[in-house]
Every structure is written in structure tokens, then in C-alpha cells.
Image (cartoon, grey):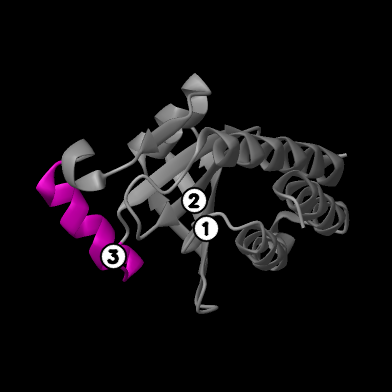
Amino acid sequence: MPQNIQHSDALLQISKAVQAMKQPLDLEGVLQIFLDQIVKTGMNVDALAVHRILDPAKRQVETYRLNKMGKVDSAIRRKSTQITNLWKEKRIYYASNIETDYEAEWITTMRARLGDRITSIVDIPFSEGVISAQSTLLNAFSNNDIEVLQQIAEILSLGFARVRD
């Protein structure tokens, strides 16, 4: 199947899952569909996370993370200045090689928390927080991958707006 058709199909399946959300806690199920569909497109993703901003002033986030092995870390609440700042600035961040893009102390902390050898990360803000795609490969994400993740961020924004209303 051509890549653009795979991406369109993945976006459709993710959109259906988001439309079925009735509350923010349904995000865990959406994340599983999100990861399954992204992997089908051939994107080099080993884990996905959705960081939902709870209190911007206190930099409180709630993280839902899923890796390809099906391990889910749900609703982990923590303080994150970096995630909150990316969200406030509406800025995409791509670290193609965290070994050169981050300080050693942060890398050690992140890898201890995530439990895998993440090498590349792309963070995409959306209305309620930040989507994070993570890979064990260097330079894992192409411009096209980032565009698809941006489209997913838009879908999540619409889903959360619908849940709020």
C-alpha cells in the first residue's frame, strides 16, 4: 500500500478512536490505536506518550505512555517544565540524537524512567498538551512523519474539545 494511503488510513482509524472518547481517561485506549496505526505506516516509533497539561502555572502534567511491547504507564502525574514550555510556546521539538541534544544527566533520568534505549524524540504540542513519539533509532523521524504527527495532534485537539463540550 502506498505510504500516503497508509497515512490516510492511520489518521482515519485514530480519528475514529478519538471520536469515541467520552472522557480524558479514555486516552489510554486511544493511545493503543494511535501506536498500532503509526507502526503500520512504517514510522520508526518504539513508544508514544501523550502529556496532558493539568496546571500550566505549576507545570503539572499527566503522562500516558505506551511502548510497542504493550507496556502502558497510565496517568503518571509529575512536574515537567520542558513539556509545559513546549506546549505554551506551541513549538515542535525534534531531537534526532539525544546523545548530542541533551545533557548526560537528563538522558540517564529519561532512560531510567522510560526503560528503553530511546535515541530520537519528537514532541508535538496540541490543545491539551504534547504528543511525544520516541524511537531507538538515530534520525528516526522524517519531515513527513512529523507532518503526520501534527495531523494526529489536530485530531486529538478536536477530540478533547468535543469531550469538554
**Picture residue at 66% right of the left edge, 56% below the top:** 41
Question: Is 64 on the left or on the right of 105, as rendered?
Answer: right
- Disc 1 crowd, CA 10 A, few/some/many (<14, 14-19, 20+): many
Q: Which residue is mark 1?
A: 48
Looking at the image, residue 16 sits to the left or right of residue 144; the answer is right
Q: Is residue 75 magenta?
A: no
Q: Which mark is residue 133?
A: 2
State yes or no: residue 111 in magenta: yes
Residue type at mark 3: give it: Arg
Disc number for residue 117: 3
Could you tell me how far apart the alpha carbons at marks 3 and 2 are, in whole angstroms?
Answer: 13 Å
Rounded to the nearest whole Å, what is the CA distance between mark 3 and mark 1? 14 Å
Q: Nearer the viewer, residue 42 or 131?
A: 42
Residue type at mark 1 is Leu
- Callout 1: helix, strand or loop? strand
Could you tell me if the residues under marks 1 and 2 are in contact, i.e. CB atoms within 8 Å?
Answer: yes
- In this orientation, which residue lies closer to the viewer: 21 or 33? 33
Identify the mark nearer the N-term, 3 or 2: 3
Indicate left or right for 138 with 128 as reference: left
Residue bounds of the magenta highlight: 103-117
Picture quarter containing residue 149? top right
User: Taking the image as drawn, is residue 84 in sight?
Assistant: yes
Residue 128 in view, yes or no = no
- Residue 68 screen position, x and y as percent: 52, 72
Give the amino acid at mark 2. Answer: Ala
Viewer-side residue, 34 vs 45:
45
Mark 2, Cα crowd under 10 Å, few <14 / some 14-19 / many 20+, is many
Q: Secondary structure at mark 3?
A: loop
Q: Residue 81's x, y, as percent?
A: 34, 36
